[in-house]
Amino acid sequence: MIILGIESSCDETSAAVVEDGRRLLSNVVNSQVDIHAAYGGVVPEVAARSHIEVINPVIRQAMQEAGVTWDDIDAIAVANAPGLVGSLLVGTLAARTLAELHDKPLYPVHHVEGHIYANFLVEQPSPSEEATLEPSSGTQPLNASSGREVRSKVASERSGDLSRGLKLPTHQPTFPMLALAVSGLHSQLVLFEDHGKYRLLGETLDDAIGEAFDKVARMLGLPYPGGPSVSAAAEHGNPRKYDFPKAKLQNPYDFSFSGLKTAVLRAIQREVGVDHTFPSFELPERLNDVQRADFAASFQYTAVKTLVDATVKATNEFQPASVVIAGGVAANQELRRQLSQQLPLPIEYAPMSLCTDNAGMIAALGYYRSQVLEPTSVDEVSVYPSMSMTQTAWNV
Ligand code: KG4
Ligand code: ZN
């Protein structure tokens, strides 16, 4: 079964083609990072406008690179929750329109759940198979000569880099499966009994872990998005230089990162000799590169340790057959290093490009939902900007 996935919940416009929930035929991602970097974060209206400009070429390119036509597509899956409302609307409307036009079943899916399903992508066409893939008729090749900047960016960012030659996990995860979902908006530990049967063990009570990375990056004067820039700076720093507290909570599987973020701010203020009334946007210029690296490393060490301790504890208590990590923060190397060292069972990781937002994960999840659920009527597919994973239709 071949599924076209569409993702537009935040600042990445993406379309992918996946076979049987495990074989990634293409995965085109058009990132808006450069656009939002100038503002230090995602500007919702700018994000929605950019999605509109690129969504059609992104979908066309995903089908072309997979070598499929509409006749080959069995269903469409789209992330319709959670995320920025304007962003979600663009992908959802595109999916509804295409489903109606080509008479395809439509499966709305939850974005965070989708992140977890990136771990189910374990196959890709081999180079020899790719050579035999004919560009599908009916799809227009994109070319960089179209005057629009965003459009040419889609063309130049060949998804070949993203969907081909990836180091994918060798096996799909088995159930029961423990999932640590860590992104810009979520930090959750979820125990899956089977596809669509899961319970939330814990979640963040305040900031998401990715948000904490982004905010600490700003305090240190490191560029947006903060996760990759903090972890790059941390490579040169001493993780033991500053001793930051780990929040102690009643439920050992809940998280809290707001106290950690404030502790970093106070330590920076102390380090540069100012009090808490000093404007935080003026702090970065008072730090040198060594201090910046040490703050990044010490923050990352505690933030990651918090996630790892909870994951190891849950693994010991619930004895899952597999553990997976998902979401943008799952790209973090320190998290992978600590987990691999401390988990009592082997763990495989999805490649970085499948950890951050992409439609391959949405198409994979769409496949598993299609195996147990009826498609949703096109007119009923709406968007839910703040829907929790536990409210999805197949988990009730
Ligand atoms: O899943 P994602 O791409 O988008 C959301 O659904 O939120 O996650 C984005 C988040 C951002 O906060 C970003 O700073 C963080 O993931 N991130 C990282 C790394 N790469 C991305 N955090 C830590 N280390 C990284 N290497
Ligand atoms: Zn995400």
Image (cartoon, helix red, strand yellow):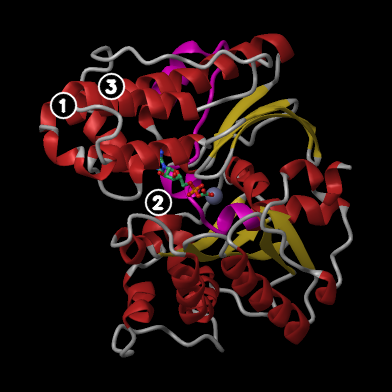
Q: Is residue 77 left or right of residue 14?
A: right
For label 1, the crowd category at 10 Å Cα-Cα, with few meaning under 14, some 14 to 19 and many 20 or more, is some
3D distance between C-alphas at marks 2 and 3: 43 Å
Q: Nearer the viewer, residue 136 or 369?
A: 369
Asked if residue 80 lies in the magenta stretch, the reply is no
Residue at position x 57%, y 67% in the image? 87
Secondary structure found at label 1: helix
For ligand 1, give the image quadrant. top left
In the rendering, which numbered label is found on residue 272?
A: 1
Residues under numbered marks 1 and 3 in contact, where contact means CB atoms less than 8 Å apart: no
The answer to which quarter of the image holds residue 172 is top right
- Residue that numbered label 2 is attached to: 165
3D distance between C-alphas at marks 1 and 3: 9 Å
Residue at position x 69%, y 62% in the image? 80
> Would you place residue 262 above or below residue 315 in this image?
below
3D distance between C-alphas at marks 1 and 2: 46 Å
Residues under numbered marks 2 and 3 in contact, where contact means CB atoms less than 8 Å apart: no
Q: Which residues are magenta?
A: 336-362
Residues under numbered marks 1 and 2 in contact, where contact means CB atoms less than 8 Å apart: no
In the rendering, which numbered label is found on residue 267?
A: 3
Callout 2, which amino acid?
Gly
Secondary structure found at label 2: loop
In the rendering, which numbered label is found on residue 231?
A: none
